[in-house]
C-alpha cells in the first residue's frame, strides 16, 4: 500500500526548523535584554525622575514666594517639569500605563511615604501632561511633566527587531535550505534515473565537503554500475559468440558419427566439451569476482614458491622456467584466495603467450604512504603493443587476432584479474620490460 501522505520537501523541512530556531534565539535575546538591560535601566531612570519630582516640590515649598516664579521657569526649561500648588485630587479612573510609569509610581510612593498615582491633565504648555501629588510643606503640590519627555518606546523597538529578525531569518533559512536541498534533489533525480537503467549525468562535486563527498561517491558508484553493465553485456555477447564455434563443430561431428563413428570424432567432441567447460568456468570466475573473503597475513616468499610449484607442470609443458624472488620477511594482509587467483591468472597468461624464463617477484614500492608491495610476473615474450595495454583488461579482448582458444585463449584472464583487484582496492597494470617482454603486476598495501 503506497504512502499517500504528502511529505514535506527537504527545503521546507529545513526552513521550518531554521525559522523556529531563529525565533527561539530572538525570544531569548529579547528576554535577556529586557531582564538584564532595559528593565534595570528603566528602574534607574524612574528612580531618578521620581527623586527629581519630589525634590522639586520640596524646594518650591521652601523657597520664598517671590522667587518661586523664577524657579518654576527654570525647572520647566531645564528639566521639563512643572509645579502646581494645591493640586486637586486625581480622577477616579486610573491611568492605564506601561512598565516605566509603574516603576515611577512605585518610586514616588517610596519617597513620599504614601501611595502615588499618575493621571493626565493639561499643563502650562500645549500637549498631554502627566501629574502626581507630592506632600511638601504641609501642602499637596502637583508635579507634572509632558508625555513627550518619555520619548523612548522600547517595546516598539523590540517589536521592530522581532519582526525584522523573523523576516531576515526566514529569508536566510530559505536560502540555506535551498542551498542544502538542491544538491540532494539532483542526487535523488540521478539515483532515480540510475534505478530506471538510464545513465545519469555526473554530479557536480562542489559545495560543502559532505555534499561534495556524497556526490563523488555517487559518481563512483554510477561509473561502477556502468562498467558492470558493460562488462556483463560484453561477457554475454562474447560467451554466446565463442560458444557457437564448438557447438557447430559438435553438430557436424554428430552428423558424421551417424554415418561412420570413429575415435577421432569422439575425441573431437570431448575437446569441444572441454573448451566449452573452460569458457563457462572462466565466465563464472568473472561473474563471481566480487566474492567476499576475509584478509589474512601472508608471508610472500614461501607463498610465491607455493604458487610456482603449483604451476610447475604447466611451465614444463610450455617449455618455460619459473624463478621466484622476494625480500625476506615481506608480508601483505590480503584475501589469500583472491590474491592467488590474481597471481595465477597473470602467471598462466605468461606461460601461454611467452614460453621461456618467467620471473615471479615481490618488492616493496618506495614512495607510497603505506609502503605498498608489488607482485610482478615478468616474461621475455613478444609483449603487447603500447596502444593495447589498457584495452586488454576488458572481457574477450585479445592481442591475438584469431578466435581460437588454442592460440588466443578466451580473453577473460586479465578481465578476471582486473575485477578481482578492483573489488579489493588493489592496483593492477601492464608495462613493457627493458630488453623485451612484458611485466604484469598487482600492487597492494603491505602488512
Image: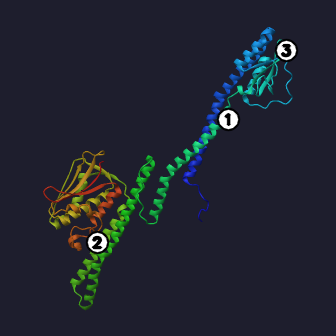
Query: Residue 156, labelled with which disc?
Result: 1
Q: Is residue 132 above or below residue 184?
A: above
For the residue pair 308 and 174, the one nearer the viewer reads as 174
Q: Earlier in the sequence, mark 2 or mark 3?
A: 3
Q: CA distance from mark 2 to mark 1?
A: 88 Å
Residue 342 % position (x, y): 28, 60
Residue for point 65% across, 35% down: 158
Q: For the N terminus, give its image quadrant.
A: bottom right
> Between tags 2 and 3, which lies in front?
3
Left of 249 or right of it: where is 87? right
Residue that carries the numbered disc 2 in the rendered image:
278
Residue 102 % position (x, y): 75, 27
Q: Which residue appears farthest toward the bottom when viewing the image?
A: 259
Left of 309 or right of it: where is 445? right
Residue 98 % position (x, y): 74, 31
- Disc 3 secondary structure class: strand
For the residue pair 221 and 182, the one nearer the viewer reads as 182
Residue for point 73% across, 19% down: 76
Residue that carries the numbered disc 3 in the rendered image:
139
Q: Is residue 255 above or below residue 101?
A: below
- Disc 1 secondary structure class: helix
Asked whether residue 51 appears in the rendered view, the answer is no
Amino acid at each position: 500500500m503506497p504512502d499517500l501522505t504528502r511529505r514535506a520537501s527537504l527545503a521546507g523541512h529545513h526552513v521550518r526548523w531554521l525559522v523556529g530556531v531563529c525565533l527561539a534565539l530572538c525570544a531569548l535575546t529579547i528576554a535577556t535584554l529586557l531582564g538584564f538591560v532595559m528593565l534595570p535601566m528603566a528602574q534607574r531612570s524612574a528612580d531618578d525622575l521620581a527623586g527629581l519630582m519630589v525634590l522639586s516640590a520640596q524646594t518650591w515649598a521652601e523657597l520664598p514666594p517671590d522667587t518661586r516664579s523664577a524657579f518654576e521657569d527654570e525647572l520647566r526649561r531645564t528639566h521639563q517639569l512643572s509645579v502646581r500648588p494645591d493640586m486637586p485630587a486625581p480622577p477616579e479612573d486610573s491611568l492605564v500605563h506601561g512598565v516605566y510609569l509603574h516603576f515611577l509610581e512605585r518610586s514616588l510612593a517610596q519617597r513620599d511615604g504614601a501611595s502615588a498615582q499618575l493621571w493626565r491633565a493639561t499643563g502650562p504648555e500645549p500637549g498631554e501632561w502627566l501629574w502626581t501629588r507630592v506632600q511638601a510643606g504641609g501642602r499637596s503640590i502637583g508635579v507634572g511633566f509632558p508625555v513627550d519627555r518619555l520619548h523612548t518606546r522600547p517595546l516598539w523597538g523590540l517589536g521592530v527587531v522581532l519582526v525584522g529578525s523573523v523576516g531576515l531569518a526566514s529569508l536566510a533559512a530559505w536560502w540555506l535550505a535551498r542551498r542544502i536541498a538542491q544538491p540532494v534533489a539532483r542526487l535523488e533525480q540521478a539515483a532515480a534515473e540510475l534505478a530506471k537503467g538510464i545513465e545519469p549525468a555526473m554530479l557536480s562535486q562542489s559545495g560543502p565537503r559532505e555534499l561534495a563527498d556524497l556526490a563523488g561517491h555517487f559518481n563512483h558508484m554510477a561509473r561502477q554500475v556502468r562498467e558492470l553493465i558493460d562488462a556483463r553485456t560484453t561477457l554475454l555477447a562474447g560467451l554466446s559468440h565463442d560458444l557457437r564455434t564448438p557447438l557447430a563443430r559438435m553438430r557436424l561431428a554428430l552428423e558424421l558419427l551417424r554415418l561412420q563413428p570413429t575415435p577421432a570424432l569422439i575425441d573431437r567432441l570431448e575437446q569441444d566439451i572441454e573448451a566449452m567447460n573452460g569458457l563457462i568456468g572462466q565466465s563464472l570466475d568473472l561473474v563471481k569476482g566480487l566474492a567476499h573473503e576475509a584478509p589474512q597475513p601472508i608471508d610472500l616468499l614461501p607463498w610465491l614458491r607455493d604458487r610456482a610449484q603449483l604451476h610447475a607442470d604447466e611451465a614444463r609443458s610450455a617449455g618455460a622456467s619459473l624463478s621466484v624472488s622476494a625480500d625476506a620477511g615481506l608480508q601483505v594482509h590480503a584475501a589469500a584466495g583472491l590474491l592467488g587467483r590474481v597471481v595465477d591468472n597473470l602467471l598462466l597468461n605468461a606461460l601461454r603467450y611467452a614460453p621461456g624464463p618467467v620471473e615471479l617477484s615481490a618488492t616493496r614500492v618506495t614512495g607510497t604512504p603505506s609502503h605498498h608491495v608489488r607482485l610482478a610476473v615478468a616474461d621475455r615474450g613478444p609483449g603487447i603493443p603500447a596502444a593495447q595495454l589498457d584495452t586488454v583488461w576488458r572481457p574477450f579482448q585479445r592481442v591475438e587476432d584469431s578466435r581460437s582458444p588454442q592460440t588466443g585463449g578466451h580473453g577473460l584472464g586479465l578481465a578476471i584479474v582486473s575485477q578481482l583487484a578492483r573489488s579489493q582496492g588493489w592496483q593492477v597494470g601492464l608495462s613493457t620490460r627493458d630488453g623485451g617482454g612484458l611485466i604484469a603486476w598487482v600492487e597492494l598495501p603491505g602488512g
